[in-house]
Image (cartoon, helix red, strand yellow):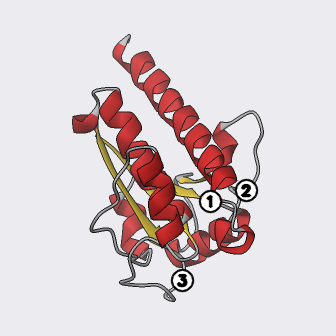
Amino acid sequence: MTRILFVCHGNICRSPMAEFVMKDLVKQAGLEGQFQIASAATSTEEIGNPVYPPARRKLAEHGISCAGKTARQLTRADYARYDLLIGMDRANIRNMNRICGGDPEGKIKLLLDFMDRPGDVADPWYTGNFDTTWRDVLEGCQKLLERISNLSAGRNQR
């Protein structure tokens, strides 16, 4: 079982988009039983709030529901609970390290570091551009799933 937690500032745009995109990709690959996927925030600003309506609409355009998701904050205990904690931007990574008390096991990663064009996932809260965020999240999640699948295949061949 691979446990992944996606993290952004408020847990209402980017990280829930990544959570539900990854769940959809895993389902399409027939791997649901091999993953536990969730998302969280580094801040407390949006705790309990649903996914931001434009993010919800962008997911729905691609046949993906995020019904019932509400924002929650990352906790220090999440570090032990998850195999990978994936931040959307460098500010998230700094805050994740602070909340988790560091990253001694190397579990905290930036989503786009799994791609050929590393960087930050575009933040639609400021840009209003959910298309760019969708592209970043989809491509990042595809590459992340590919990397995990390749690692699992390598372990199974031993």
Q: Which residue is mark 1?
A: 88
What kind of residue is marked 1? Answer: Met
Q: Quadrant location of the C terminus?
A: top left
Q: Residue furthest bottom?
A: 45
Residue lying at 47% horizontally and 71% vertically, measured from the top left: 53
Q: Which residue is identified by label 3?
A: 43
Question: Can you see residue 84?
Answer: no
Task: Specify which label sits upstream in the sequence, 1 or 3.
Answer: 3
Residue 65, given in percent of the width and then of the height, sits at 33, 54
Q: Residue 88: x percent and y percent?
A: 62, 59
Location of residue 87 (image quadrant): bottom right
Locate residue 83 relative to residue 108 in the image: left or right: left
Q: Is residue 3 above or below residue 53?
A: above
Residue 97 seen: yes
Pick whichever of labels 1 and 2 is earlier in the sequence: 1
Mark 1 and mark 2 in contact? Answer it, CB < 8 Å: yes
Q: Secondary structure at mark 1?
A: loop
The residue sitting at the top extreme is: 157
Point 29% across, 31% down: residue: 31
Image quadrant assignment for residue 114: top right
Viewer-side residue, 155 vs 110? 110
Reply above or below: 36 against 51.
above
Image x and y of residue 145, in percent: 47, 33
SS for dot 3: loop
Residue 72 at x, y = what percent? 39, 77
What residue is disc 2 on?
120
Q: CA distance from mark 1 to mark 3?
A: 14 Å
How many numbered callouts? 3
Circle 2: residue type:
Asp
Quadrant of the frame with the N terminus: top left
Pointer 2: residues within 10 angstroms few (<14), some, or many (20+)? some
Residue 129, by quadrant, is bottom right
